[in-house]
Image (cartoon, rainbow, N blue to C red):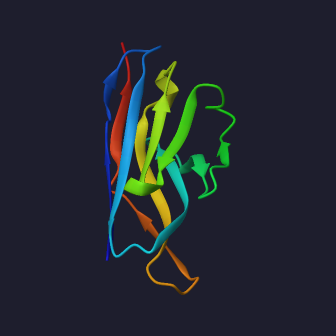
Amino acid sequence: QVQLVESGGGLVQPGGSLRLSCAASGSIFSINAMDWYRQAPGKERELVARIISGGSTNYADSVKGRFTISRDNAKNTVYLQMNSLKPDDTAVYYCRADVRISVYPTAYSYWGQGTQVTVSS
């Protein structure tokens, strides 16, 4: 089994910063893509940022220039540095990972439990 555990959420004022972390543990052979998603009340879950094993990244237009995704492959951990936060960034943030659990190429998708980020004065 594989577990993803997020941390780092909380309450921050507009213009502030937060850093989210997501650590994967369990029967991990390797991890391909690692993502951050978010879901605001009444809205669909949306992809915020993605980083693949080689380090290439993609961002939603709404967070480009403000958020930075990174990963530590040795620790099976992905980070999301969020700067210049806005009230519209308020949501539950989830990490997701494509995990290989053996030498076979099949990767399985795992999700964390989510961490609340609230941007408010």
x 43%, y 67%: residue = 110
Tell which of 85 and 69 is nearer to you. Answer: 69
> Where residue 7 sits: x, y (%)?
30, 43
> Where residue 47 sits: x, y (%)?
58, 49
The image shows residue 86, relative to residue 77, as above or below, that is above
Whether residue 51 sits left or right of residue 82 in the image: it is right
Give the farthest residue toward the front: 74
x 65%, y 40%: residue = 60
Q: Identify the image quadrant of the C terminus.
A: top left
> Where residue 67 sits: x, y (%)?
56, 31
> Where residue 14 sits: x, y (%)?
44, 15
Whether residue 24 sits left or right of residue 81 in the image: it is left
x 56%, y 83%: residue = 106
The image shows residue 20, relative to residue 36, as above or below, that is above
Tell which of 26 and 110 is nearer to you. Answer: 26
Number of numbered discs: 0
The image shows residue 35, relative to residue 66, as above or below, that is below
x 46%, y 83%: residue = 102
Q: Identify the image quadrant of the N terminus.
A: bottom left
